[in-house]
Image (cartoon, rainbow, N blue to C red):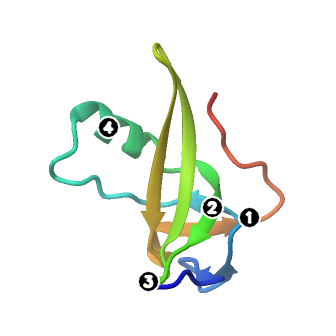
Amino acid sequence: MPALSSTCDAKGFAVQPGDRVRILSIVPGPDMEDDDVDMIEFMIGSICEIDRVDGEGHAWVTMWWSCADGVATSTVALAPHQMERVEGMVASRRV
């Protein structure tokens, strides 16, 4: 499915790549390791920049983490009810 140029947030506002959103909720997958679940759950409340919007209307965001082995990333797809647009704030980047 081709990528879309925009989707909407939990309040119905249009969001597109480059916009900043606050993550309202994420549901970890049932087969995720505990460390991955911790990282995903920590993202709730964080402000991230939208990287892209897929063909199903999910906004993809990435968060960077500083860890013992260097830098790790977590990338998640957010449905509209899982995010809200935030204006005038710097996106969270953990390095």
Q: Nearer the viewer, residue 31 or 86?
A: 31
Task: Residue lying at the far front in this picture: please name it.
Answer: 2
Question: Could you give the CA–CA distance between mark 3 and mark 4, rounded to whole angstroms?
Answer: 24 Å
- At horizontal 48% and vertical 60% (from top left) the residue drawn is 24
Residues at badges 3 and 2 in contact (C-beta under 8 Å)? no
Mark toward the start of the polypeptide (1 vs 4): 1
Q: What quarter of the picture does the N terminus occupy?
A: bottom left
Residue of label 1 = 18
Q: Amino acid at mark 4?
A: Asp
Which element is circle 1 on? Answer: loop
Callout 1: few (<14), some (14-19), or many (20+) C-alpha neighbours within 10 Å? few
Residue 73 x, y percent position in the rendering: 50, 39
Q: Amino acid at mark 1?
A: Gly
Which element is circle 2 on? Answer: strand
Question: Could you give the CA–CA distance between mark 1 and mark 2, rounded to whole angstroms?
Answer: 6 Å
Residue of label 4 = 36
- At horizontal 54% and vertical 31% (from top left) the residue drawn is 65
Q: Nearer the viewer, mark 3 or mark 4?
A: 3
Q: Amino acid at mark 3?
A: Glu
Question: Could you give the CA–CA distance between mark 2 and mark 4, rounded to whole angstroms?
Answer: 20 Å
